[in-house]
Amino acid sequence: MSESTELVDEVSGSGDGHGEERQPEPDAGSGVLRVFGRQLKRLRVRAGLERPEFGSITGYSVSTIAAYEQGRRVPPPRFIDQADEVLDAGGVLLEMKEEVARAQYPAFFRDAARLEGEAVELHVYATKAVPGLLQCDEYARAVFTMWRPLLAQDVIEERVAARLARQEIFSRMPQPTISFVIEEAVLRRPLGGGGRSCGGNWSKSCCTASVATSSFR
């Protein structure tokens, strides 16, 4: 059975690249990240590894390892794969990989991200900002840099990485049918500050998602 899903962008409830988040920012040390962190630390201690040694093996700094164990940062999939193998976790960490990945997104968008990843049809209508699936690094970074209240730099980096990772949908097999209806003003509207902007040349520099299953109007 065909499943059609319409989603708002994670910038705000209405998909506005300039809007403020409608719900309070979740505690980064709560929920699945804190559970993952406790398991990670328990497995590291069981393996007899100190943070510096574990960090050296996996290629991450001591402070980053500490942040993962304390649930203050979202570990990337590559780290989870390494940690499960190095710590002989038997898949314990890998089982949490999907939920940890969802923690990269603001709370209000996590269910939407899950549906987006499962959808066989996706239809987006954008009136205020370029849809997240079509944003390049520069555009996404400008969106999150202008977020109010201001986001910490490490949070901006996580949000940008999470947004770009969503574009994996374009290489998924079987490929979903995707359509975007974007108002012309969105493509012409400058975005950013400090003498820098992107938006007017978006169609040339930012739209890298050119696949047979997508249509643009």
Image: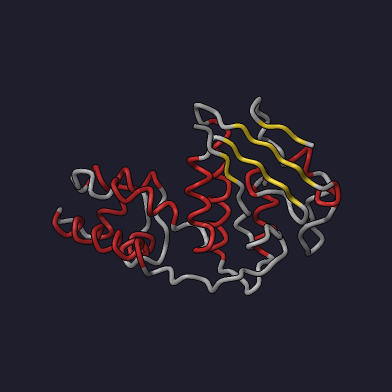
Task: Work out whether 45 lies above or below 7.
Answer: below
Nearer to us in this view, 141 or 59: 141
Q: Residue at x 54, y 50 (%)?
A: 161
Residue 104 in percent (x, y) is at: 48, 57
Which color scheme did the rendering employ for the protein? secondary structure
63 to the left or right of 22? left
Task: Work out whether 207 lies above or below 43.
Answer: above
Residue 45 in percent (x, y) is at: 17, 60
Residue 122 in percent (x, y) is at: 61, 40
Q: Residue at x 85, y 46 (%)?
A: 184
Q: Quadrant of the C terminus?
A: top right
116 to the left or right of 60? right
Q: Residue at x 57, y 61 (%)?
A: 156
The answer to which image quadrant residue 171 occupies is: top right
Nearer to us in this view, 165 or 176: 176
16 to the left or right of 60? right
- Number of numbered discs on residues: 0
Residue 196 in percent (x, y) is at: 79, 57
Task: Work out whether 187 lies above or below 214.
Answer: below
Q: Residue at x 78, y 51 (%)?
A: 198
60 to the left or right of 20? left
The answer to which image quadrant residue 169 occupies is: top right
The answer to which image quadrant residue 29 occupies is: bottom left
Q: Which residue, as the protein is rendered here, is positioned at the far front? A: 1
